[in-house]
Image (cartoon, coloured by chain):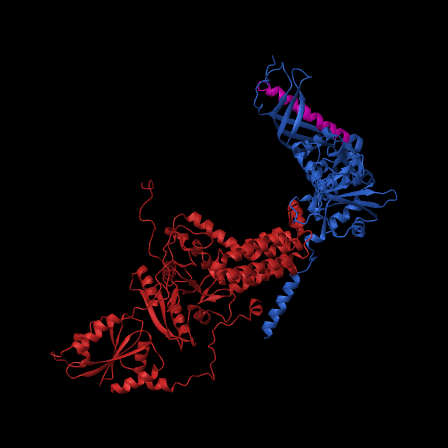
Chain colours: A red, B blue
Amino acid sequence: MGDIMFSFFKSREPKKPKRTGTEVPEDSQNNSSTQIPKSIDKVKGLLNQEFSLCSDFILREVLLGKKNTRIIIASIEGFFDKAILAENIIEPIINYSGEKSYSSIFTLLSESILSVSDLKELYSFKSCLDGILTGDVVLFIDGEDKAFKIGLKSPEKRAVGEPDTEISIKGSREGFTESLKTNLILLRRRIKNTKFKVESLVLGKQTNTDIAICYIQGIAAPEVVEEVRNRLNSINIDAILATGYMEQFIQDGKMPFFPMVGNSEKPDKVAAKLLEGRVAILADGTPTVLTVPFLMIESFQAQEDYFGEFYFASFMRLLRLMSFFISVYLPGLYVAVTSFHQTIIPFKLMLTMAATREGIPFSSFIEALIMVITFEILREAGLRMPRAIGQAVSIVGAIVLGDAAVSAGIASAPLVIIAALAGICSFIVPPLMKVGAILRIVILIAANVLGLLGIGFVTYMFTIYLCGKKSFFVPILSPFAPFRGESLKDSFVVAPIWSMFNRPRSLTQDQNRKRTTGKTFAPRGSKK
Amino acid sequence: MIKKVILLLLCISMIMTLTTGCWNNRDLSELSILTAMGIDQTEDGKIMVTAQIIKPVDVSSSGAGVSGGGGGGEKSFVVVSNTESTIFAALRTMLAKINKKIFYSSSQVIVFSEDLAKSGIKNYVDFILRDHETQFKSLIVVAKGTTAKEIVEQEYGLSKIPGGYIRDTIKNSKSRGFTKELRLLDMARELATEGRELSIGTIEKSENLTSTEGLAVFQKDKMVGWLDKYETRGYMFITGRAKSGIIEIESPDNPKEIIGIELMKGSSKIEVNSSSNNSIEVNVKIKAEGNVGEQQSQSGQSPDKICKSLSKCLEKQITKECYSAISKCQNEYKSDIFGFGIHVFDKYPKYWQKVTSVWSEEIFPSIQVKVKVDAKINRTGLLSKTIKIR
């Protein structure tokens, strides 16, 4: 039944986008992917052809030793400190007097001349181009069909700072940056283990963005890792400017209604997810990291839940769940109750509500719709506008739309409270905020058509839909459906962390955390 | 494809089964909220329904900023009467006089007039039970000495919602024991149960307020008489409904001095036996616990010393109230409002079948009822002895 209603959303395999007729002629690339020409002039010509009109391209020619071997140093400006290039590469080459004997010019360069740590030999012209584009320095030597790639990269980047989107009070304040290397370091610093694997690949036909797949071997399920690899490799897109571009390609189903991929900007959070058996996908240029498989319950989890008082964490967890339901259901419930089920309102409350509704020209549905949509407009305005005019929006929002609407008799006071409460509650669970906004309106309409019955019906439909959804082989409603008793320790409530002996069953291949008791010391008085 | 069509049909049929029943979208602001309903009988045998309709803006002090003045002397409700042959028609044709559809799920009390009760209520309960909108929690009262309309249209200074005011006074019978709280659902049950007659609490006008004390005794669906407040409490004791209340007893030393006992607990147990000469004998065992709440005696002993004799007096007083209720029902009204018949039916079903039709009129008046009260005085309040006046 759910399948029919949602056949619109349904398609298990992400289909590759068809790209007929838009093929780029690859003649020039075919040429350049071949071997590096031995003649240095040819190399120079090719480089100049490829990088024509690229003003940030640097080409420097130097002579080595007594033989005056011509060497070309090619790179892109700005990726590294020019002084290092001059001191460690150009200077030793020029100053080389050529007293030692050597077998080949390559060993001479790598063993005696170049004082750099990251040195690699390249054999195809294509890889040389990639090297230059990613910010490495490439050395071409006259008469050789090989080239040197020297990593000097230290590009401009933002300092590691606290992300605005995920604030933590007790935990780490670090957030991912736009640099892939930095992000990997942030993760590696948290998981000092050779089992922490980082696979890299390049995506985006035009952008050639570096992507990294991270997982912990032995914990992450191999089939999930394999699936992530496959889905990423099958992406055929011009540009990956943010991880969000990949999200749509790799998520299960063509148009899933609920989020199917986790997002985070915090290394500690991603590390925790990796340790539970998830796979993280990082892309150069985005501070947001994707984690799969994604479970619904993740939206309600916060890093701080695992620190300190578990009872308070449990309370917060329940509160978050409740807030989500309030944000989705409250306006709908109000409409259902005031237009269909007046009987269930306590008598005195009914009088109060009737009094506030008196003289309002709209039905409670129209009124609720106006208020809910107004709230969404305000929210979006607050998000998009330049910070400096933020004040104006809050004033207009609070006074004009709230208070004035009530005193003008256009909206009733309880509804303003309800719209505001529902809106605020939706911010408590950010991953579900977008889907919550849509659901709220769907429920509102259902409530207006069929009352509580309609609300029940929509809930029923969405529950069925959700039960059938899987994110990378894992049902997204687990541990509730399918039921995983052990994993419930970290669901509506949070059990003390020492009592969580097992990793989430649906995620990992090796569930057991291999410890018999979490606590290494016996509580006082329990020794006998 | 066929599978999908079948699923779709299944889906639609599921929605259809879910959406049966009565539903329609009516906004709260398009309803007239009825809080009390009075049902009178006119001289030509028709029914006059009086509806008390609340004006929410005038009731709620925090209106939506559009309240039209309100305040000083203006009533917060409107009373509309309408006469028709059926209650349903009367309520519906009332729409000729009021603009919004009447919402009577919010009805707090339903008042029957004395005349109507005496001529039988069976014709009028059907609607209030049949209609899906009536509130089973509405309390039922019989107006004594006045018409139902007079009760409903009266404005009571204590509350802006007269229906709510009447409901609350009946509800606090819990701490008085002088009247019976009877919901619509209970009334239906009492009317339908064999072996127990209906009894409904009464309401009277008392200056600007109402007073709910006493009980209207019914035989089948016709009212036959009243019980006063003490007899009512006797009834409440026998049926185990008396849970709290102040019982005034005479001091064991000096009958002129009155001691007020606050009843804290009460329960009753009814046992039916057949005696040797094949007549029914009912034993009512009542357990009561109370505290001394007030003592007028200046000379007497401190109550904690005479707990035993005080509890004897309490027993005597409760027994007296019970017997007065029983004898009135047996001799005057011939109506088994206590439900002894139910116990007979439980114990002697075969015998009950024989006497069902004549139980109230013939058998019940002649059965022997024994009331045994077991009372206890627990506490004597903050004083052990009344203060000495110089």
**Left or right relative to B106: residue B97:** right
- Compared to B94, does B271 lie above or below? above
Residue B259 in sight in this render: yes
Principal SS element in the magenta part?
helix
Q: Hey, which quadrant is residue B241 in on the image?
A: top right
**Left or right relative to B150: residue A200:** left
Residue B325 painted magenta: yes
The N terminus of chain A lies in which quarter of the figure?
bottom right
The C terminus of chain A lies in which quarter of the figure?
top left
x 60%, y 55%: residue:
A333
Residue A380 painted magenta: no
Q: Nearer the viewer, residue A332 or A265?
A: A265
**Looking at the picture, how far across and down is residue A139, in whole percent?**
25, 79
Q: Nearer the viewer, residue A239 or B23?
A: A239
| Magenta-highlighted residues | B303-329
Q: Nearer the viewer, residue B375 or B343?
A: B375
**Left or right relative to A425: residue B201:** right
**Looking at the picture, how far across and down is residue A477, in whole percent?**
48, 61
x 21%, y 75%: residue:
A90
- Compared to A174, does B263 lie above or below? above
Numbered label tally: 0
Residue reaching furthest right? B44
- Compared to A49, does B136 lie above or below? above
Q: Nearer the viewer, residue B11 or B336?
A: B11
Q: Hey, which quadrant is residue B152 in on the image?
A: top right
Residue A482 in sight in this render: no
**Looking at the picture, how far across and down is residue B378, in whole percent?**
58, 25
**Looking at the picture, how far across and down is residue B208, in whole percent?**
75, 34
- Compared to B124, does A288 lie above or below? below
